[in-house]
Image: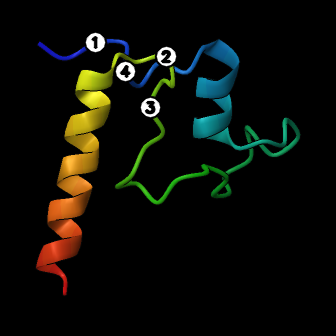
């Protein structure tokens, strides 16, 4: 199956993805997460298999939107 660590960017980067890049705002009730809730960064150390699947889905999505 797919790599179970594909969304694991490391402790520090995972924290930044969730709480934002400012440590002062991390625990205040404001929106600080970096993503849009739909698209997520993946671990760049992945083998090509999962990355290729993502790229194929993006290409399919773009072709349907045209």
- CA gap between label 4 and label 3 equals 6 Å
User: Which residue corresponds to the image point at 47% horizontal and 18% vertical from the top-left?
Assistant: 8
Q: How crowded is mark 3: few (under 14 residues within 10 Å), some or many (20 or more)?
A: some
User: Which residue corresponds to the image point at 25% horizontal and 27% vertical from the top-left?
Assistant: 50
- Mark 3 lies on a secondary structure that is loop
User: Mark 3 or mark 1, which has the lower sequence index?
Assistant: 1
Residue 8 located left or right of residue 55: right
Residue 36 located left or right of residue 59: right
Q: How many labels does the image show?
A: 4
Q: Do the residues labelled 4 and 3 touch (CB within 8 Å)?
A: yes
Question: Where does label 4 land, which residue?
Answer: 6
Q: Do the residues labelled 2 and 4 touch (CB within 8 Å)?
A: no
User: Mark 4 or mark 3, which has the lower sequence index?
Assistant: 4
User: Which residue corresponds to the image point at 67% horizontal and 52% vertical from the top-left?
Assistant: 32
Q: Residues within 10 Å of mark 2 (few under 14, many from 20)?
A: few
Question: Where does label 2 land, which residue?
Answer: 45
Q: Do the residues labelled 4 and 1 touch (CB within 8 Å)?
A: yes
- Picture quarter with the N terminus: top left
Nearer the camera: disc 2 or disc 3? 2
From this viewpoint, which residue is outermost toward the right?
A: 24
Query: 28 or 9: nearer the eye?
Result: 9
């Amino acid at each position: 199956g797919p790599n179970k660590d594909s969304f694991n960017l490391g402790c520090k980067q995972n924290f930044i993805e969730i709480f934002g890049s400012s440590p002062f705002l991390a625990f205040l009730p404001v929106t600080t997460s970096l993503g849009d809730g739909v698209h997520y960064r993946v671990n760049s150390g992945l083998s090509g298999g999962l990355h290729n699947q993502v790229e194929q889905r993006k290409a399919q999505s773009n072709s349907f939107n045209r």
